Amino acid sequence: MSVVGVRPAYPGDVGAVADIQVRAWREGYGGIVPAEALAEMTSDTAIGLWRDRWAEAVSAPPSPRHRLLVAVDEGVITGFAAQGPPEDPDQDAGTTGELLTLLVDPAHQRAGHGSRLLAATVDHLRDDGCATAITWVFAADDVFRAFLMSAGWAPDGAHSKVDMGEPVPMVRLHTGIA
């Protein structure tokens, strides 16, 4: 039986986190994100930038409510989730928290790591006094949206587009966590 769980990320985890991000994006976002943008965001240069970004998230988070969690299986980092206060002006930062990202290494998917990361994120948001959690997903990311909806998340009617060389539609999901 393997030892699995979720814990806060340590500085030594940031390389694995960046590598997982790139692998998960390469495998999961083809056809969702424009090819040129995806190639740029998963390039060797980008991996270094992501490592720097995640290192800062671990060593100097912007607020006490910003957290980076990692899923582990027998000591191997298998996925990660980042959370923080909501970035949207229509959300109450006192009662709402945001799942900023949740990615599982493609080699470790369908083993419960995403569910554990999501549950741990919700637990932390609840501990921070949040009654609602939100997240943004690519509108065409049927897999991640279905995963969240199976856990009780639903669209809240907010839509956006992120500029990735061309506009990519986003949908905001929410769930009650009180």
Image: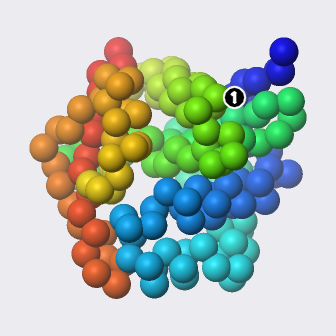
Residue at numbered disc 1: 6
Q: Residue at x 33, y 47 (%)?
A: 142
Q: Residue at x 54, y 82 (%)?
A: 40
Quick check: can you spot residue 85? no
Q: Residue at x 61, y 39 (%)?
A: 109
Residue 55 percent coordinates (x, y): 73, 59
Q: Quadrant of the N terminus?
A: top right
Residue 98 percent coordinates (x, y): 40, 41
Position of residue 118 relative to residue 22, above or below, is above
Residue 72 percent coordinates (x, y): 76, 33
In what element is the residue under mark 1?
strand
Label tally: 1
Left or right of 57 in this view: 130: left
Q: Residue at x 45, y 62 (%)?
A: 29
Which of the 4 image quarters holds residue 47? bottom right
Q: Quadrant of the C terminus?
A: top left
Residue 18 percent coordinates (x, y): 69, 60
Position of residue 7 relative to residue 93, above or below, is above
Quick check: can you spot residue 22? yes
Left or right of 37 in this view: 94: left
Which of the 4 image quarters holds residue 35? bottom left
